[in-house]
Image: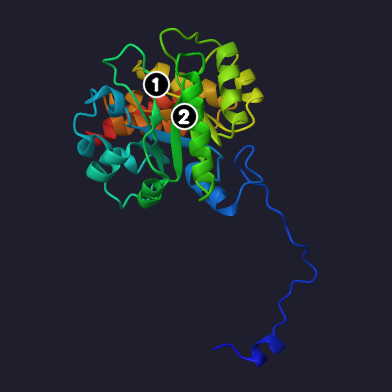
Amino acid sequence: MADKNGNVLAKSYGLDIPAKNYPFHVKGMENVDWGMKDRLSRIFRPDSGKTVMLAFDHGYIMGATAGLERLDLAIEPLAEHADAMMATRGAIRSCIQPNHNKPVILRASAGSTVLKEDLSDEVVGVDIDDAIRINASCLAIQVFVGAKGECSSLNNLVKTIDAGARYGIPTLGVTAVGKEMERTNRYFMLATRVLAELGAHIVKTYYCDDFEKVVAACPVPIVVAGGKKVPEFDALTMAYEAIQAGAAGVDMGRNVFQAQDPVAMIKAISGVVHDQLTPTQALDLYHTEIHLAQ
């Protein structure tokens, strides 16, 4: 038990050292609460300020996706190499071990499947209490700017932002791109800015021409979606160009788990994002990892 002598003898006050304010490494998040900063620091590595998210939430609208037929077999070898995992609560609870200690970006919106023409009519599909039980570090909401369900999806976003903020949990706003929406920097500049203005702490969007303008106009971190499977060099080039344009990371799914060697691919992507490897250097790393694994 402490006693009064301990206080009398205390002397290490550092009187010659002024108190230091440390700048926060996540864009636009200097003034959020400590708990939210702690969660964001788990997602965005403090040494680089960037993140490699592993997305495997495709089943919430697509069902069993190529490469994700067995989530336990597909994701377990990749989890240790990702900075964060973006997934549904069902996938996390049933298929992913709780010992990876990776931040979970929890898919919190739900809606129609790919069997429907219009996917924009979504709802909030996860209660905040369940997100806390899962120990989610972030909540993800899909927003359909320009689609029929634009207003309702924006409502889902703001409701989730408010619910998460009560407990220091940030929200990731995802810019959906449907058949009727344009994929131009003008569109992405509008969509990402709207999500940030409504309070999203992170925005996920697609890479496009003049992407540096999209990043500059968005006051919070932008993470770039991997999209459909493309050749490995093309995926690495896209990641490199996005990072060079100011993106705070990538959220790769099909370009990882559908690669010839998924583990080698996520290591190569991490090299681009965190170690500033060029696409050629990253592709060399990819082939080296394949060789070493044989």
Q: Is residue 188 above or below residue 218?
A: above
Residue 250: give its label: 2
Q: Residue at x 59, y 31 (%)?
A: 198
Question: Contact (CB < 8 A) between labels 2 and 1?
Answer: no
Residue 111: quarter of image: top left
Looking at the picture, tell me which residue is in the foreground, 74 or 159: 159
Q: Residue at x 73, y 74 (%)?
A: 13
Numbered disc 2: secondary structure: strand
Q: Residue at x 36, y 47 (%)?
A: 130
Q: Residues within 10 Å of mark 1 (few under 14, many from 20)?
A: some
Residue located beneath label 1 in the image:
121
Quarter residue 18 falls in: bottom right
Instruction: Pick the residue in front: 149 or 179.
Output: 149
Say which amino acid is labelled 2.
Val
Q: Outermost residue, right direction? A: 16
> Where 169 sits versus 118, above or below?
below
Tell me the amino acid under the disc marked 1. Answer: Asp
Earlier along the polypeptide chain: callout 2 or callout 1? 1
Horizontal and vertical percent position of residue 100: 33, 49
- Is residue 146 something one can see in this rendering? yes
In this rendering, is residue 266 above or below 242?
A: below
Residue 52 x %, y %: 44, 35
Q: Describe residue 15's horizontal placement relative to residue 98 as left or right.
A: right
Question: Where residue 230 appears, x then y in whole percent?
Answer: 36, 15
